[in-house]
Amino acid sequence: MTQKNAIHDNLLNSITAGKRLLAVLIDPDKFCVQNSNGFFEKVNASVATHIFVGGSTVEDHRTAPVIKAIKSHTDLPVVLFPGDVTQLTDNADALLFLSLISGRNPDYLIGKHVDAVSRIPRTTLEIISTGYILIESGKTTAVEKVTNTRPLSRHDLETIVNTATAGELLGMKMIYLEAGSGAPEPIPPAIISATRKAISIPLITGGGIRNKEQLEDAYNAGADMVVIGTAFEENEAFFNQLKK
């Protein structure tokens, strides 16, 4: 069992120390437990600092055994990034309690959270409230389909920044700018930079990052943590560019 608030506190301390954080996103439906040893040899040799686990749609009872396998291969903190309450499990270290503040579907603003309360293992799972902002990327993402919400236009910088600021004022501990899984383009640096200047809480960005240059662009624009999933699924050699 992790110490209460250990994941979030360590994240804040790392950011204060100027450390760049990198989360490897694993979709339980796409992860092959049998072939995980080689994958995590690359993860452990890289600069990755966290493992995120979740997906917009995941088969019931799939998440827990995948996390168990992950923990047998790495000591990195494992954080749930769930698309639904069925993905909750106390096998993880922490839970991003995501509120889709870019949309107006009440289920994903508060409804799913109410459903989740009775499922949350209160003694072991660290809960980190996170404002989740979906930004259009040039394609319809799984998040958009599942939540029945529209992403914010990447050209409407004022609304994006105001939404992030509102999330902080509502008491959320982090803001997550998301282009969506498999996005053709990452979040533009200008959006990251403007959001970073407007908020004081940690800023995460993910979606569409497929090379080291795009990763550096996100950090240089002000992202505290970058999340990469699809790029590693499609090309594990990407890890070779990110060795410690």
Image (cartoon, rainbow, N blue to C red):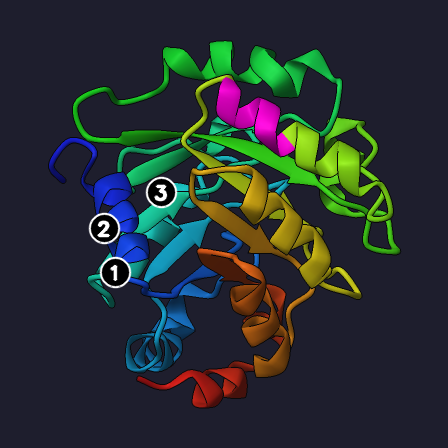
Q: CA distance from mark 3 to mark 2?
A: 29 Å
What residue is shown with label 3? 64
Sequence-earlier tag: 3 or 1: 1
Which SS does the magenta portion mostly show?
helix
Q: CA distance from mark 1 to mark 2?
A: 6 Å
Which picture quadrant has residue 89? Answer: top left
Q: Disc 3 residue type?
A: Ala
Helix, strand or loop at mark 3: helix
**Residue 165 pos. (x, y %):** 59, 29
Q: Is residue 69 visible?
A: no
Q: Is residue 206 visible?
A: yes
Query: Which of the image's four quarters has the C terminus?
Result: bottom left
From what the image shows, is residue 10 above or below residue 222? Answer: above
Residue at 65% across, 15% down: 107
Neighbour tally class for label 3: few under 14, some 14-19, many 20 plus, Cα within 10 Å: some
Discs 1, 2 touching: Cβ within 8 Å:
yes
Q: Disc 1 residue type?
A: Ala
Helix, strand or loop at mark 1: loop
What residue is shown with label 1? 17
Which picture quadrant has residue 228? Answer: bottom right
Instruction: Report if residue 69 lies within the magenta region.
Output: no
Relative side of 237 to 210, left or right: left
* Segment tinted magenta in the rendering: 164-169
What residue is shown with label 2? 13
Residue found farthest to the front = 197
Residue at 26% across, 22% down: 121
**Residue 164 pos. (x, y %):** 61, 33
